[in-house]
Amino acid sequence: MKQPKALAEYLIALADDELILGHRDSEWTGHAPILEEDIAFANIALDEIGHARLWYELAAGVTGTDKSRYPDQQVYFRPAVDWRCLQLVELPKGDWAFSMLRQYLFDAFESHRLEGVTASKHQPLADVAARIRNEEFYHLRHTRAWVPRLGQGTEESHRRMQAALDELWPYAQGLGAPLPGELELEEMVPHSHSLFMLWSSEVTQFLIEAGLDVPKSGGCVEVDRAVHSEYFPALIADLQEVAQLDAEAQW
Amino acid sequence: MVTIHSPKIALDEIWAALAEVPDPEMPFVNLVEMGIVRDVDWVDETLRVIITPTFAACPAYEVMGANIKDRLHQLSIENVEIHFRHSPSWTSEWITEAARAKLKAAGLAPPPHHSGNLVQVLLDPVACPHCDSTNTSLRNSFGTTPCRMIYTCNDCREPFEQFKPL
């Protein structure tokens, strides 16, 4: 197989996004505004972590490492500087509007990426994407219901949702940057830039219909995935603390 | 030197044993009728069992692997390897009619047949597994496990879960 290094980098970036997003989502467990949402968002968090695992395991296959240990090693023992997630998913959970909107913006993009990856000529990649795509269908359905509900709800819900959009929009522009390894993979994977064009017109229309003002583009924050937000070191320390107390422990 | 191989157990006896391994979360159905155990073959002296996990985040499938091994050890099959096969992806279409009846009898509405079109099938009303009424309301697309959705029946007033179509 050609370009294993590029493919491994690509897969790890996909996995890192899912894991960190799942981690942030999981912070709502026990704290969601209503019980049904506590259940729903905990499930979404769990799904994202499950998806991360699938991508990490595929990366293990590409690099010839032990699939059963690789996800844990990547998640619990890798230094923060080596992660390749987008800053969008690192941001703290904020209020409910913020988390619903972040999940929507990310999942709407992922939906386009998964469509493209299911058509990849590299069969193992296409297979994992097909797996994930049907579960993601339920996530997008969920957040697509929340965004208009809050955007058009009360004065307070609208204000919070607009504030969330104003803060998230520059970070979301980073979705359009190529993933690590993507350019070397050429036609094996869809191009992030093309996906971004599809995403941008779709979500802009959706947000306007949800009663929101879409910020003007151009104020993009850091797109280099090797550069993390100020929140990331504390997130990783929290995530890794228990496992690193005893690296040899059997769970 | 003569090497003596113990006679290998026939595959249909093995399948029958695997059909006795219950789903850890829903012990009224087994792993074969849920479409989780996909294939079994002998590779030299090792029995290979191929399973396809259902939902990506299902925490039960490692337990499933352990339970499968235990059941096969009872047949004196010592060397068992569990292989996870991800393609084709598990789909709720693989749940047999017998398993669907058992789900309903246990108060869990079975997933509808969907032929790959989730958007369409989610528009259809879901029948209450207790009273069969289709006057039901979706309360949550997500339930107590990754594979369930939560409904209430407006006629008999019972809440129930549906196995999520995937």
Image (spheres, coloured by chain):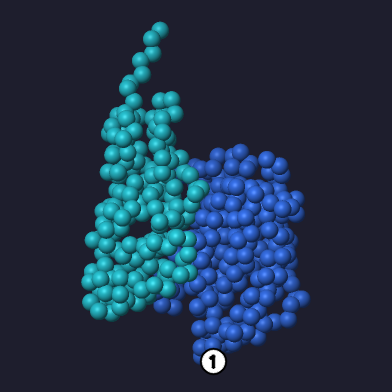
Chain colours: A blue, B cyan
Quadrant where the N terminus of chain A is found in the figure:
top right
Position of residue B50 relative to residue A32, above or below, is above
Position of residue A242 relative to residue A45, above or below, is above
- Residue at the location (36% across, 54% down)? B95
Q: Where is residue A178 in the image (x, y as percent from the top left)?
A: 72, 60
- For residue B13, side relative to residue A136 (left or right): left
Disc tally is 1
Q: Which of B98 and B69 is in front in this view?
A: B98
Q: Where is residue B2 in the image (x, y as percent from the top left)?
A: 38, 9
Q: Is mark 1 on a helix, strand or loop?
A: helix
Q: Which of B158 and B134 is in front in this view?
A: B134
- Can you identify the residue that label 1 sits on? A155
Q: Where is residue A95 in the image (x, y as percent from the top left)?
A: 53, 78
Q: Position of residue B18 (x, y in %)?
A: 32, 41
Q: Which of B78 and A190 is in front in this view?
A: A190
- Residue at the location (59% across, 52% down)? A126
**Chain to which mark 1 belongs:** A
Crowd rating for badge 1 (residues with CA inside 10 Å; few <14, some 14–19, many 20+):
few
Position of residue B84 relative to residue B163, above or below, is above
- For residue B75, side relative to residue A40 (left or right): left
Residue type at mark 1 is Glu
| The furthest residue to the top | B1
Residue A241 in view of the camera:
no
Displayed quadrant of residue B143? bottom left
Q: Nearer the viewer, residue A112 or A234?
A: A112
- For residue B81, side relative to residue B25 (left or right): right
- Residue at the location (59% across, 56% down)? A118
- Residue at the location (50% across, 78% down)? A145
Position of residue B95 relative to residue B125, above or below, is above
Residue A207 in view of the camera:
yes
Displayed quadrant of residue A234? bottom right
